[in-house]
Amino acid sequence: MSFPKVPISVIIVCIIFAILGGLWGAQAAGVLDIKGFLGKLPFIEETEENPQIEISPLEEENKKLQEEITELKLQLSEANQSLKSYVTEIGELNKQIELLQNENMKLKTQDENINNFVSYYQEMKPKEIVPIFENLDDEMVLKIMVRLESNHVAKILAEMEPMRAAKLTKNLTDL
């Protein structure tokens, strides 16, 4: 059996690759330190063991935007809580307004009723009014008397029991 003739240059290139492969394998296995040797050669730059990783401007901008988003989410959460408390407060105030409107309606009705009584009592004689007033509480009597004509009130007080007339007179002056 005969071997084909291989040019010597191919054999030399194969030997060089075999040597380089062996050196690289020894470096990878930790047997040799080729970096120290290669770093001394003028045409090969020595690389740093711990290269600093540069952060791109886009990554910095992204980080700032993420922080801003987090802050805005927090503000939104606080605003939602405030909104809920305001809605609750508005509901309570609306209930109070409704109660006050009902109370106002009652007072208007009561005021209209008192005005009707005043017109009735204005037509009556004082002697007829006194027995009715004796059965009413002082507050109601005062509300009616304030709206009657002063000469009519004077005649009614003259017909009343002196102690009650004095008490009503004092209360009238306080109004």
Image: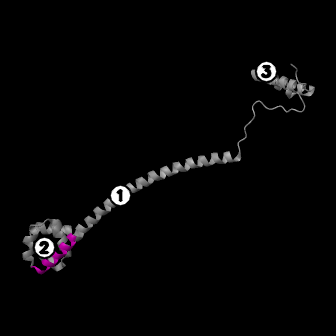
Residue located beneath label 1 in the image? 91
Residue type, label 2? Leu
Label 2–label 1 contact, CB within 8 A = no
User: How far is disc 1 from disc 3 in space, using C-alphas?
Assistant: 81 Å
Q: Is residue 65 visible?
A: yes
Callout 1: SS:
helix
User: How far is disc 3 from disc 2 in space, using C-alphas?
Assistant: 129 Å
Residue type, label 1? Gly
* In the depicted structure, whether residue 49 falls above or below residue 86: above
Residue type, label 3? Ala
Q: Start and end of the magenta stretch?
A: 109-124
Q: Is residue 130 magenta?
A: no
Question: Number of numbered discs present?
Answer: 3
N-terminal-most mark, 3 or 2: 3
Residue located beneath label 2 in the image? 157
On screen, residue 138 versus residue 80, left or right, reads left
- Residue 151, given in percent of the width and then of the height, sits at 16, 80
Using the image, tell me which numbered label, if any, was put on residue 100: none
- Residue 87, given in percent of the width and then of the height, sits at 39, 56
Residue located beneath label 3 in the image? 26
Of residues 41 and 88, the one nearer the viewer is 41
